Image: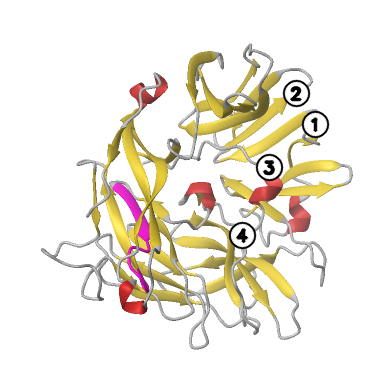
Amino acid sequence: MNRSTLAKIVSPLALAAMLVACGSKPSGTEMVVHPANDTPITHIANYDMLGDTAASPEGLYEVCSVRFGSCNLLYVDAATRQETYLCATPNCTHDSESCNSYLPLEEGRYGYQLFFFNGYLYAAQCTPIESQGPYLMRMDPDGTNREIVLELENGECFSGMLYGYGDRLLLQISRVDENGNSETCMEIFDPQTGERERLFSLQLEPGGKESASLMGAAGTSLIFLKSDEEGRQYYKVDLARENPTLEQGQTNLLGPEFDETGLYCTVQGDYFCTYDIAAGRLSWENLLTGQKKEFPLPQLSGEETVYGLALLYDDQFALSMSSSEKGSMNLLLNPETGESTGVYYYPTRESGYDILADFGDELLYKVRTDERPLEGQAAYGLVGEVSYHNVYAMVSKEDFQNGIPGEEIPFPE
């Protein structure tokens, strides 16, 4: 299964850092010498970030706060197009640790975030409490055999992006020391042995407050964005080199310098995309194969604001734009010619098209977020509290390309 990149264009700086709560003590992780290594970096999560969903080769996992004081794992089976609690016990109420879908929430904790990697489902608890720091739990695809494979120290937190790296993981870890000084590092983590290796710091200067903005990955390289008064420039840090550093990467440039007024560039999955506003031309490059395509901006009514290309799946792109009358919209483009197919998608709160999983000939996408009464709230004297869950649909790629929506999948009762 090929992971898809969500059909959404945002500013590169908006993707930069996603920080969660930290404590007060620095990590003891040591810098080690890293020999040259041609292990490829792989995409294992939408947006390359922890989130409330995780795609596997056979389906999609979701974590929801269905009842007060806990979370539950749900699963959408791509073959049956059904969503169920991740539980095979008949008549289970899904409200205790005897249920495979149940995830407890200690006081002071918030929800979990997921990803699927090398045949296992992972749940990250990002909120520290006094007795335990943030941790990463691994389990079998059916929710059994749970094991905490990584527990961060006080002062550490998961931040930003994550990738597969052979049988190991590439993680961004932030830490705050006793004096309030913060640092973000790239680390390699082996979930089989629990070993952590520090690659390099993302601080742009020793003791500085500004961190490099990790924007993506392709092949053996992590891709960063440098921004200053002169403009913005992508560059690559190649992990195949011995002892890779940010300084090495800043001479390994990717694409032209741009300012988002005359030229707009983005990294989406394994693709580097450009929109030359002045020339009215679009282009993309597959950073793995070197394949490139350039084509003129399709003829539009003139009322739209164009943001650039949005990668949907495979090499299917859309033109991301908006208008005062119709709001945000995606215009599907012909993969061969880049011409307009005439098929528009208008994502709204009630009907969205965020592609979360690619199952070959079929796609699974998020339609909207629904709400339902929060179970168990009466026991705590609460009234009117609600829980939120995603509503999904599955559609063939042929129907999607023709603007035919998929059938919604009911949420389990």
Quarter placement of the C terminus: bottom left
- Read off the residue under disc 2: 277
Q: CA distance from mark 1 to mark 2?
A: 7 Å
The amino acid marked with disc number 4 is: Met
Please name the amino acid that badge 1 sits on: Thr
Are dots 3 and 4 in contact, CB under 8 Å? no
Q: Nearer the viewer, residue 392 or 380?
A: 380
Quarter occupied by residue 408? top left
Judge whether residue 360 can be spotted in this image.
no
Q: Which residue is mark 4?
A: 18
The residue shown at (32%, 46%) is: 57
Residue 261 badge:
1
As measured in the structure, the alpha-carbon distance from the residue carrying label 3 to the one carrying label 4 is: 14 Å
Residue 184 has which mark?
Answer: none
Disc 3/disc 1 C-alpha distance (Å):
12 Å
- Under mark 2, the amino acid is Ile
Q: Earlier in the sequence, mark 2 or mark 3?
A: 3
Sequence-wise, the earlier of marks 3 and 4 is 3
Q: For numbered disc 2, what is the local secondary structure?
A: loop
